[in-house]
Image (spheres, rainbow, N blue to C red):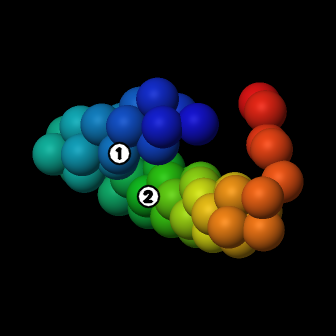
Amino acid sequence: MFGLLITLIIIALIAGALGFSGIARGAAGLAKIVFVLMLVAIVIMLILGAMGLAVIF
């Protein structure tokens, strides 16, 4: 998931630098969504770990 986030950010930066604002906006929006999903997954794993439940991915 982290690799996807980095890829989307790089696409947004390159597209923005080349003047493709629509593509840059879309890639940045997707990067924000992936970032929020990663944060939610981390919080869930921390809560489950504090409760003593093993989480294996």
Q: CA distance from mark 1 to mark 2?
A: 6 Å
Image quarter hosting the N terminus: top right
Quadrant hosting residue 44: bottom right
For label 1, the residue is 9
* Label at residue 53: none
Give the structural element (helix, strand or loop) at label 1.
Answer: helix
Question: Which residue is more in the foreground, 49 or 43?
Answer: 49
Seen from the viewer's position, the closer of residues 38 and 49 is 49
Q: Which residue is mark 2?
A: 28
Residue at the far right in the pictured view: 53
- Tag 1: residue type? Ile
**Left or right of residue 18, residue 52 in this image:** right
Q: Residue 16, percent across and down?
A: 25, 51
Furthest toward the left, the residue is: 17
Q: Residue at x 37, y 37 (%)?
A: 6
How crowded pointer 2 is (Cα within 10 Å; few <14, some 14-19, many 20+) is rated as many
Task: State the quadrant of the C terminus.
Answer: top right
- Identify the residue shown where x is 46% and y is 29%: 3
Residue 33 seen from this side: no
Near mark 1 (Cα within 10 A), the count class, few <14, some 14-19 or many ≥20, is some
Compared with 2, 46 (above or below) is: below
Whether pointer 1 and pointer 2 mark residues with C-beta atoms closer than 8 Å, the reply is yes
* Numbered-mark total: 2
Of all residues shown, which one is farthest toward the front? 52
Question: In the image, what residue type sits under mark 2?
Answer: Ala
Q: Residue at x 79, y 43 (%)?
A: 55
- Depth check: give the residue in front, 47 or 33: 47
Q: Does residue 34 appear left or right of residue 51 in this picture? A: left
